[in-house]
Image: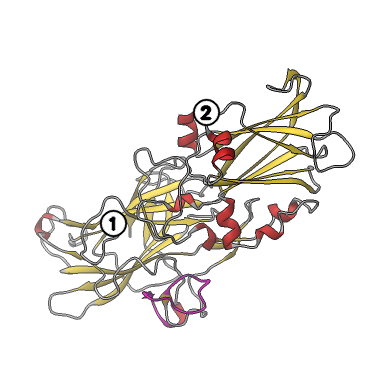
Amino acid sequence: MNLKQLSLAALASMALFACSNDESLGGSDENGTPKAVYMKLEGISASAVNGRSTDAPTEGGNHTVTVSDVAVIFYQDGGNITDIEEITSADDKKWKALVDPESGDGYRFVVGHKADKVMVIGNYQNLKEKTDIEGKVVENQPISGVTDFQIPLSSQNVAGTGTDETTKACVTLHGDAPMTKKVGEKAPEDNDYDVYEAHVDITPIISRVEIKSLGCVFNKQDEGTAGTPTEHLYTSVTVKGIGMVDYYNMGTLGKDYTTQMVTNTTSNPDGLIYDPEHASVPEGGYKFCGGENASWGWSYDMIGASNGITLTSGDVSSGSVTKYVGANAETQTQNEFQTFAYNFFPKGEIANVRVWVEAQKESESAKKSFVVTANFKDKEDGGTVVEPQAGNIYQFDYLFNETVPGVWDKDQKVVYVKVTVKKWTITTVYPDFH
């Protein structure tokens, strides 16, 4: 697989060469011959972490999965961990040996003779900081404790401080593979050693949605009437909050997803959008809807609480469209270098995206309404509901007609988003509203 394929398919390929002879190489097992392992990573770029709710859109050359560190875990299939190695990009010598094409055969270290499989976890340091997985990654402990460890979604949507980084830099990647002997071949540097190899593809454990823009079409017309619209319902629609709902809050490296956060929950009585792991409402929280229909959501820190994002009707006779792009809510200017982004565990349908708006008429008070995705389909017209896959990005313009906003009904979704799936790259999709 070449570098271009690696970037588009969101796979980081690792080649391992394991060798053995009668010498003692310092492996972890007292009995049996240790194995010297040569490891190489391809298609990797180093970067730091980023904020959660707004992010750089996946455009141009920004398709490559970013990995800043790895944990390499050797183990006996169905048994215990034998050896563990953590390598970060801060360790210049080791990281260069891993990722530099000119660094020879790669990084060499020694593992116990019982090891017959290898697991690789990308961006492991972030996972250690946000969870207790380190207590499971222990020599002589069962590998199942790592595979079945419950990972909260919050660890895959990490808040950061930079302006140019991406949340994709914090996403956990995972893969494993058996080590197999290559008959008739010898190790590159140790000619007396038999050669073993393993090819591990590490892929993101999450899916991702990126909302390129928010927009309202002010072109209301009587049902069945053809021609240019001549009237409209509202003079403006102000977006007050946006969030991902109906998502699974826990997942595992083995892709077992549990603990779904439902839209109708009494544990959030104020109806504020905020991180479920916060014990209290964070500063900048947004009211989605109160009382029985209170909702969880990830994006509580995107839109200015006082102003929101106002989409105006403009020249309604021409069926005008007003869009908001980006994250600069204070000035409400468009920013093509930012998008609303959410990482989620891919189980069932794609996670729901809800927008709270206040629709304004000329002489009446603003009407609080909601615009909500129902599902995502694979074609613009018709098609079937997409079941999300790990490592895929689903990108679309959140563009709705002014007739769509209405009172939130948790049992009736009103937005149908059409989606074409590609691997970890920009995919334009088209919303259909009813």
Q: Main secondary structure of the magenta part?
A: loop
Q: Is residue 44 magenta?
A: no
Q: Which residues are magenta?
A: 273-291
Q: Which mark is residue 101?
A: 2
Q: Position of residue 309 (x, y in %)?
A: 25, 66
Kindly identify which residue carries mark 1: 326
| Viewport quadrant of the N terminus | top right
Q: Is residue 280 magenta?
A: yes
Q: Amino acid at mark 1?
A: Gly
Q: CA distance from mark 1 to mark 2?
A: 37 Å
| Viewport quadrant of the C terminus | bottom left
Give the residue at x 63% y 51%: 253
Give the residue at x 41% y 76%: 272
- Name the image quarter holding residue 345: bottom right
Viewer-side residue, 329 vs 125 = 125
- Name the image quarter holding residue 19: top right
- Vertical placement of 365 versus 414: above or below? below
- Name the image quarter holding residue 220: bottom left
- Vertical placement of 350 versus 85: above or below? below
Q: Position of residue 54 (x, y in %)?
A: 36, 58
Viewer-side residue, 288 vs 38 = 38
First of labels 1, 2 by sequence position: 2
Q: Secondary structure at mark 1?
A: loop
- Vertical placement of 192 versus 304: above or below? above
Q: Amino acid at mark 2?
A: Pro
Within-10-Å neighbours for mark 2: few <14, some 14–19, many 20+: few
